[in-house]
Each structure stands twice: as structure tokens, then as C-alpha cells.
Amino acid sequence: MQDSPLARVQAALREAGLGALWVSAPANVQYLTGFESPEDGRVLVTQDSATLYTDARYTLQAAQQSSVPQFIGRPPESLAHAAEQLARLSAPAAFEADALTVAALDILRESWPGELVPTQGLVSGLRLRKTPAEQENIRTAQKLADQVYAEVRPLIQPGTRELDISLEIELRLRRAGAAPAFETIVASGLRGALPHGTASDKVIQEGELVTVDMGAALAGYNSDMTRTVAVGEVSGELRRIYNAVLEAEQAAVRAVRPGLTGRDLDDVARQVLERHGLAGAFSHSLGHGIGLEVHEGPRLAAISDDPIEAGMVITIEPGVYLPELGGVRIEDLVLVTETGYEVLSQAPVERV
Ligand SMILES: CSCC[C@H](N)C(=O)N1CCC[C@H]1C(=O)N[C@@H](C)C(=O)O
């Protein structure tokens, strides 16, 4: 309890001179309470209490899952209940500035007494380093994704539609009790130049590269991995960009260790691609943290000072996108350890 996420948020409130925090970011609601329908939940954390607010659709579920007491009801009753707690505080209450619409803030201001101040990162900062239990959840989600990828890999052949590959992946994830972490990306041939090219009805042809970017969501935690494979013989230029991306990816993975910043790792990959004359075609960041959300801190990007620390789970995913030719992305899921890294994604990276 002493070191639980809730206890740490309460300690942070005391340190910041805040009386309470209204938590509305779904991942933060789940992190603090264990409630697995967090889009329909909010949490009021004070220095010595916490209440989960949700509605009657979730009475039983919230009682089974939540580690904090629940108030079942909708606004205005729920906000009036929170207002009673806030009225006892002498310090201002805070809200999550990155997880509240202007309209929702107006309603809180109309419903509650006292000052309401914006905060950022109070809870999501705690989520950056994963506990051993969280690491295990992500590892299990990735193992399932590896298994599903292996089962579906034989379908990536001439004559198959991209859509049928994504459907097969998503069906197999769901059969196993998981869900897709995000809409599966299957981008073949020229569509490979779309970094977020979700599967279309395009039919895969001989001589194309096919990029599959997939993740499993299990027990609230997500995985994320990309493989690009060749269908038959591909052109020399496609082979060249594939091997350049592979070199960049492997260099960045091998560089992972605590003490660096997100920018340092992004630089490693970008420099390799620069040597191959391809840095201009790497149009996104190197990677991101992952956990209760697919995209969370730290950012691995050219503009990121985010520190890389042991316990973080990150993706390393350089890509090259050339509209006239196609694209390549290779992505691994990596746990940052005290001494370096452990690659969690085990699906084979093929030679092209
Ligand atoms: C819609 S979730 C996509 C998951 C994927 N593995 C991923 O994170 N991608 C695909 C290419 C770029 C990268 C991404 O979206 N990165 C973000 C963080 C960025 O802003 O660069």
C-alpha cells in the first residue's frame, strides 16, 4: 500500500500543496483503481482518500475490480458527491489538463467550490516505469502476438488480400481472449509507403514487400511489433532499403540502456539511415513507451529529452517510406533493464 500508485499520487499531492486530483484520463483511472472500463470512470483522489465514479452499468464490475470505494451515479449527482469532499479541503484541487475538454472543465467549475488548477503528468509520470507485474502483462501480450503472427505468416503470399490477413490476426487474438491493441496495419507494395496503412482490399502480388504492424491487448496492457516480409523475389532497391532499415533497427536496439534520452536513441537509427541516404524518408519518430496505452511516454524522437530508465517498455521502429517504391518498417518491443535491454518480441526477422 505504502508504494502503491495511489499512495504515490497522494504523496505527490502533498508535495505540490494540492488538496485533490480529478483523474479523467482512462489509462490513469485504470492504473489507480484496476477498473477495466475506465472510459466510463473518473477518480477523485484526495490526500487521504480516493473514490471511483462510474454509473449503474458497472455496479457489479466496479465492485469486483476496483481497489477503491465507488460512487455509482451520473452527473449531476456524482459531481455533487465529489463537491462535498472538495468543500472540506483547504488546498486547491487539480485536474488533468491533457484529459479534459473545455466543456467538461466548465461543468466542473460550475459544480465545485474552490480553485481548480491544471496539472500534467502527475499519474502518467508514474506509469513510465513498469512494475514487474506490468512487465509480465506486456510480455504475455507480446507472446500471444508472436504466436498469432507465426500462425498467420503463411497467408502472406500472392493472391491474399491485405484485409484477410488483418482479419485472421484479429480473429485469432480475440479467440485467445485478447483484442487487437490497434487497427492492424497490413501494407503491401506501394501501400507500404503509408506508415499507418491499415489493411485494404488490395491483393498481394509476387515481388512485393508486405509490412504487418500488430499488437495484442490483454488484461489492459498492450504489445506492438512490426515485421516486413518479401513475397517471392523483390527488386534490388527494395532489398537495399530493407537492409538499411534492419541495420538502423538493430543498431538502435543494441544501444538501449538507462541513462540515454529518447533523442539519443532516435539519433542512432537516423544516422544509420543517413549513411544510406534514406534519413529523409524516415518520416516519424523512432518509437514510444507502451503499457496501458499503445502510445505513452517516453517519446523516442529527435525532439525528445525524455530519459530512458530501467523498467520502461519501449518500441524501436524505424521505417523508410518512398511513394514511388513502397516502404519498410521493422519494430521490436524492448524492456529497458538495469544493464541494457531485453527484446520481448520474438517473431523472426526474415532475410530479404
Ligand atoms: C495506431 S498505433 C500504431 C502502432 C505503430 N507500431 C506505431 O506506433 N507507429 C507506426 C509508424 C509510426 C508509429 C507511430 O505512430 N509513432 C508515433 C508515436 C509518432 O508520432 O511518430
Image: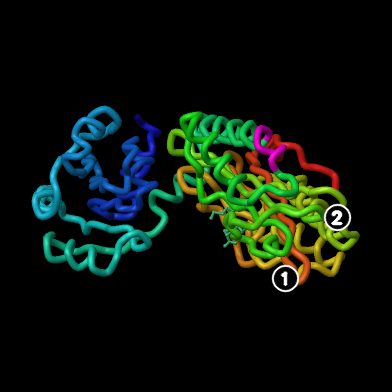
Dot 1 or dot 2: first in sequence order is: 2
Seen as rendered, the residue at the extreme right is 236
Mark 1 or 2, closer to the camera: 2
Q: Choose top left, top right, bottom left or bottom right for residue 116.
A: bottom left
Please give the residue where the numbered disc 1 appears in the rendered image.
323
Label 1 crowd bin: few (<14), some (14–19), many (20+), radius 10 Å: some
Is residue 73 positioned above or below 196 on the image?
Answer: above
In the image, 168: left or right of 323? left
Identified at 39% across, 49% down, the residue is: 123
Q: Is residue 338 visible?
A: no
For the record, the magenta segment spans 150-155
Please give the residue where the numbered disc 2 appears in the rendered image.
234
Distance in Å between CA atoms under marks 1 and 2:
16 Å
Identified at 80% across, 67% down, the residue is: 278
Identified at 85% across, 44% down, the residue is: 351
- The kind of residue tagged 2 is Val
Is residue 37 positioned above or below 176 on the image?
Answer: below
Seen as rendered, the residue at the extreme front is 159
Identified at 71% across, 59% down, the residue is: 319
Q: Residue 239's spot in the image, x, y percent?
A: 86, 56
In the image, 129: left or right of 69? right
The N terminus, quarter of image: top left
